Image (cartoon, grey):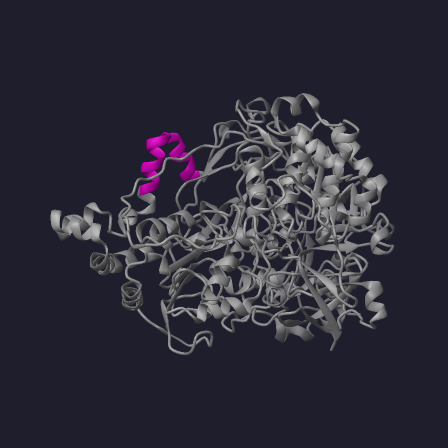
């Protein structure tokens, strides 16, 4: 079975929000800024006065569930509603979710939100029940991205684009000190 | 802290733990549908959310569009859809859409309408129009008609111009980019296309290509291995992404360009071989630039860009292999805009970056056959008057501000009594909205064809609901010059409610109007009277081309099939139906990885074509009319503002296409409203904090906005985005959100192309 992950050539991001809209339309996510499976986080600042601005450290980071190998949310759920699918994606048994929100508080990446339509917590699942379930090995955010900065695929397959790019380029993961072992990689 | 210009999502994210369930009452109704794997149809279409026309495939489940995906076959759009493209679904299913024909029952502008049948709407228009044209003794130009950017504009012109006989067509060109088109055409004989992907050194003045996407330019910039220099009075995302950002005073880009030319000529950095072969009157340009002493030191005073920097950029530009001074695709900013664009073209020419890779290329666009129509001749129809006093101007789209001024000032040679407005929100799109309102109030008949109850629709006597781009097929379009292709907008779903395509609307209108208007003509037109005497009424009508609906007898589908098969072949037709696109190498596209493709093989791209052309340094016609034949700086171009005044500049967010996207809920959740960018130092001295409300007042009107203090804008300049402040209460989500720039921008226009100059208004601000 596949072991899905995603890599971001994050410096190419122009913060256009196409990924956010595509995700919502594909996965039927409710409108409203608080309902989101993914978002772009703007970090940094530009210092100096207008005529003498210094080189800024502004960056746009693609944020979504990090698909941790050691997922805090999975352990936190008192009802064992969260499980890991055979393709490596952290999923939810919706019928077992009792909205304790323990998973939300446990997640160090703030990746989860309350899906008020289905009364469960929701997060990015790499379009597992939409595109992947139809056999399309692409996610909505990846295919629409104008910068084509998102690499998605099977980390266990050496020939996949994501494996190729990770073997050639340097990258970092978010909050590595927590030992969650994310499967999302930011290419430097 | 309010964090008003920061990502809203980030703000909400940080406070999510506090408000997780408390805000459930705010949750919006269901507007998105999860795609499922049931029976599905993927129809190729062309986007219409902005001017780019990117290609996509629409996923249709149970006759509902559930998702829009990018189309990898279209060279222009590079296999992507932007946020607006993705949010196109909301344009179709917007609950505020115009659904039925409406006739006004209240006063103009108060929004009171009654639902009528299509026939009642046509009948109403007929009665009014026959009366008007009779009163004006068959002067068809008493009807003005306008259409914003879009595929069907030419078909619309054929109806009201060619068939109905009015000379008064107006479009977005004179509030958009006509100076750029004109300057390029007059200087090198063609409007050309900029090869951004092929350029290794690019300068952008003002255009904000990462927040106002143009395909393929914006996408190519992301991937091109090039040095990017950005000049802008505001630190935009494009500026952030540049290798070098040069802040400057608004309206002084021309001084920078003149100085670049000075360095190129003085230090002999220009491409001598190219200049010798292609330039007309180079000696005049040389003499002018040198004698005017447009030194970097001089330009520093005008622009605020350090002289050494100008010298450095000029050196780098003229020593690059494929340098490009990007001509922009943006509004006209200043009085000197035409000369600025011309200077940019001349800089490219001095570097030899014309008709070659990475420069302005001519390429080889695919020419499509024109369908023939029988055009009547109206002896009594008078000519257009909006180009009076304009040196060149666009004979096609005219000059909006000059037109409006003459109509409301009663200085036009004849009264304009009726107006047909399509896909053009004139109550929001041009400076000084009060004047547009006055113009419309003076009309005897205003008809609006649109999809949304815009501010302009609320001024109409009759509203005709058009279907959206996903509900119709349009005529075949040819795209681009470097990698030419054909693309077809296929119909994805049938029109919702009682909306119709423009062609269907004009067909119905034509059927209703043809004979009654022919009868009016026969009262006044002596040639027509003779023709009737000779041939009889019926034959005079048909041979004279008075059947207004002639063009629409056949459906668009039939017309497209005929056109494609007569000019191309079965394979092209099949490709356009199944993939929405055709180009000669469509079956040989190479995947470069991660969804990026090659289209034309490198050796087949039309970088350089055989063509005789000259670079015109000196334009005699300009001199004859009292303007500069060669770009020149005048002291009145110097940037200055009065004490306590600020220069207002405008622009937009990536989520807006002017006001057309204002009511789109999906886009609103990314950017709900605009705010005023004010220099942080100035804000501090005025004791204005982030989120404070201020009154922004110009000489003509005032608006209220929240302030975003920032070091990303100069102390004498303020900015807020266009596309907000809709005044139509029928736009549930857009109504009164943010402020409209055109309320307060003064209606000044330059006299070479008659274009509105958007950056010549000073404002004061006062804390509320």
Q: Is residue A106 left or right of residue B124?
A: right
Where does residue B528 sit, x and y in percent of width and height?
A: 20, 51
Examine the rendered structure and indicate whether residue B511 appears above or below residue B357. Answer: below
Horizontal and vertical percent for residue B658? 57, 58
The answer to whether residue A184 is visible is no
Q: Is residue B571 magenta?
A: yes
User: What segment carries the magenta color?
Assistant: B559-578
Q: Is residue B350 left or right of residue B46?
A: right
Residue B694 falls inside the magenta stretch: no
**Between B146 and B527, the one nearer to me in the picture:** B527
Q: Residue A97, position in %: x, y? A: 66, 65
Residue located at (51% from left, 58% from top) = B402
Q: Magenta: predominant secondary structure element?
A: helix
| Picture quarter with the N terminus of chain A | top right
Residue at 75%, 41% (x, y): give it.
B229
Identify the residue at horizontal 80%, vertical 51% (top origin): A58
Q: Quadrant of residue A107?
A: bottom right
């Amino acid at each position: 079975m596949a072991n899905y992950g995603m890599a971001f050539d994050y410096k190419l991001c122009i913060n256009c929000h196409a990924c956010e809209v595509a995700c919502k339309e594909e996965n039927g996510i409710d409108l409203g800024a608080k309902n989101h499976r993914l978002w772009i986080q703007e970090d940094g600042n530009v210092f100096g006065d207008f005529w003498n601005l210094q080189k800024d450290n502004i960056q746009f980071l693609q944020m979504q569930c990090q698909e941790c190998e050691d997922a805090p949310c999975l352990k936190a759920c008192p009802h064992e509603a969260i499980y890991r699918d055979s393709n490596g994606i952290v999923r939810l048994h919706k019928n077992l979710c009792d909205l304790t929100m323990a998973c939300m508080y446990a997640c160090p990446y703030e990746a989860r939100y309350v899906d008020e339509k289905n009364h469960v917590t929701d997060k990015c699942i790499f379009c597992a029940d939409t595109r992947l379930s139809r056999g399309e090995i692409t996610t909505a955010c990846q295919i629409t991205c104008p910068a084509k900065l998102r690499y998605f695929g099977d980390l266990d397959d050496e020939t996949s684009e994501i494996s190729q790019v990770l073997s050639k380029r340097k990258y970092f993961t978010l909050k590595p000190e927590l030992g969650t072992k994310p499967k999302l990689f930011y290419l430097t | 802290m309010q964090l008003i210009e920061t990502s809203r999502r980030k703000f909400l994210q940080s406070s999510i733990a506090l408000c997780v369930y408390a805000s459930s009452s705010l949750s919006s109704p269901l507007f998105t549908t999860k795609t499922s794997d049931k029976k599905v149809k993927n129809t190729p279409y062309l986007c219409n959310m902005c001017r780019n026309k990117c290609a996509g495939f629409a996923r249709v489940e149970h006759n509902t569009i559930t998702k829009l995906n990018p189309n990898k076959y279209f060279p222009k759009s590079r296999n992507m859809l932007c946020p607006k493209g993705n949010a196109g679904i909301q344009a179709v299913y917007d609950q505020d859409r115009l659904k039925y024909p409406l006739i006004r029952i209240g006063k103009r502008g108060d929004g009171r309408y009654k639902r009528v049948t299509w026939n009642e709407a046509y009948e109403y228009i007929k009665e009014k129009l026959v009366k008007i044209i009779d009163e004006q003794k068959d002067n068809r130009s008493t009807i003005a008609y306008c259409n914003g950017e879009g595929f069907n504009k030419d078909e619309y012109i054929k109806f009201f111009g060619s068939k109905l006989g009015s000379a008064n067509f107006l479009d977005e060109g004179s509030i958009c980019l006509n100076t750029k088109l004109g300057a390029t055409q007059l200087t090198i004989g063609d409007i050309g296309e900029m090869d951004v992907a092929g350029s290794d050194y690019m300068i952008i003045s003002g255009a904000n290509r990462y927040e106002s996407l143009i395909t393929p330019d914006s996408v190519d910039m992301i991937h091109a291995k090039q040095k990017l220099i950005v000049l802008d009075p505001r630190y935009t995302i494009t500026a952030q992404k540049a290798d070098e950002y040069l802040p400057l005073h608004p309206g002084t880009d021309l001084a920078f360009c003149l100085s670049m030319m000075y360095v190129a000529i003085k230090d002999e950095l220009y491409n001598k071989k190219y200049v010798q072969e292609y330039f007309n009157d180079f000696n005049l340009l040389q003499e002018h630039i040198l004698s005017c002493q447009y030194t970097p030191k001089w330009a520093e005073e005008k622009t605020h860009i350090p002289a050494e920097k100008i010298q450095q950029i000029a050196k780098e530009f003229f020593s690059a292999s494929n340098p490009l001074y990007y001509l922009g695709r943006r509004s006209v900013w200043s009085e000197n805009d035409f000369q600025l664009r011309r200077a940019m073209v001349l800089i490219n020419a001095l570097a030899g970056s014309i008709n070659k890779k990475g420069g302005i290329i001519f390429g080889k666009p695919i020419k499509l056959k024109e369908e023939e129509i029988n055009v009547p001749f109206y002896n009594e129809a008078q000519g257009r008057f909006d180009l009076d006093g304009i040196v060149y101007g666009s004979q096609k789209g005219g000059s909006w501000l000059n037109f409006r001024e003459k109509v409301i000032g009663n200085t036009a040679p004849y009264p304009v009594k009726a107006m047909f407005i399509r896909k053009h929100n004139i109550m929001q799109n041009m400076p000084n909205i009060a004047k547009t309102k006055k113009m419309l109030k003076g009309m005897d008949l205003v008809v609006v064809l649109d999809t949304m109850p815009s501010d302009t629709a609320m001024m109409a006597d009759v509203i005709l609901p058009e279907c959206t781009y996903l509900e119709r097929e349009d005529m075949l379009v040819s795209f681009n010059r470097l990698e030419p292709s054909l693309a077809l907008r296929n119909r994805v779903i049938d029109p919702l409610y009682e909306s119709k395509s423009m062609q269907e609307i004009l067909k119905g209108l034509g059927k209703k109007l043809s004979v009654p208007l022919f009868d009016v003509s026969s009262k006044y037109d002596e040639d027509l009277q003779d023709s009737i005497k000779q041939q009889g009424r019926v034959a005079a009508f048909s041979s004279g081309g008075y059947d207004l609906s002639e063009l629409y007898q056949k459906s668009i589908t039939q017309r497209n099939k005929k056109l494609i098969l007569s000019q191309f072949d079965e394979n092209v037709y099949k490709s356009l139906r199944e993939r929405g696109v055709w180009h000669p190498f469509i079956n040989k596209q190479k995947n470069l990885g991660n969804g990026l493709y090659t289209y034309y093989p490198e050796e087949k791209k039309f970088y350089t074509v055989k063509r005789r052309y000259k670079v015109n340094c000196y334009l005699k016609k300009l001199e004859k009319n009292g303007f500069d034949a060669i770009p020149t700086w005048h002291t009145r171009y110097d940037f200055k503002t009065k004490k306590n005044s600020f220069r207002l500049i405008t622009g937009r967010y990536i989520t807006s296409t002017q006001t057309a996207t204002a009511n789109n809920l999906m886009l609103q959740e990314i950017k709900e409203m605009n705010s005023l960018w004010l220099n942080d130092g100035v804000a501090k001295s005025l004791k204005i904090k982030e989120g404070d409300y201020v009154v922004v007042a110009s000489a003509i009107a005032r608006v209220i906005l929240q302030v975003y203090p920032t070091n990303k804008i100069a102390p004498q300049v303020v900015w807020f985005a266009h596309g907000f402040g809709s005044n139509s209460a029928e736009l549930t989500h857009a109504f009164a959100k943010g402020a409209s720039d055109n309320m307060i921008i003064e209606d000044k226009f330059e006299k070479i192309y008659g274009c509105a100059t958007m950056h010549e208004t000073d404002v004061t601000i006062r804390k509320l």
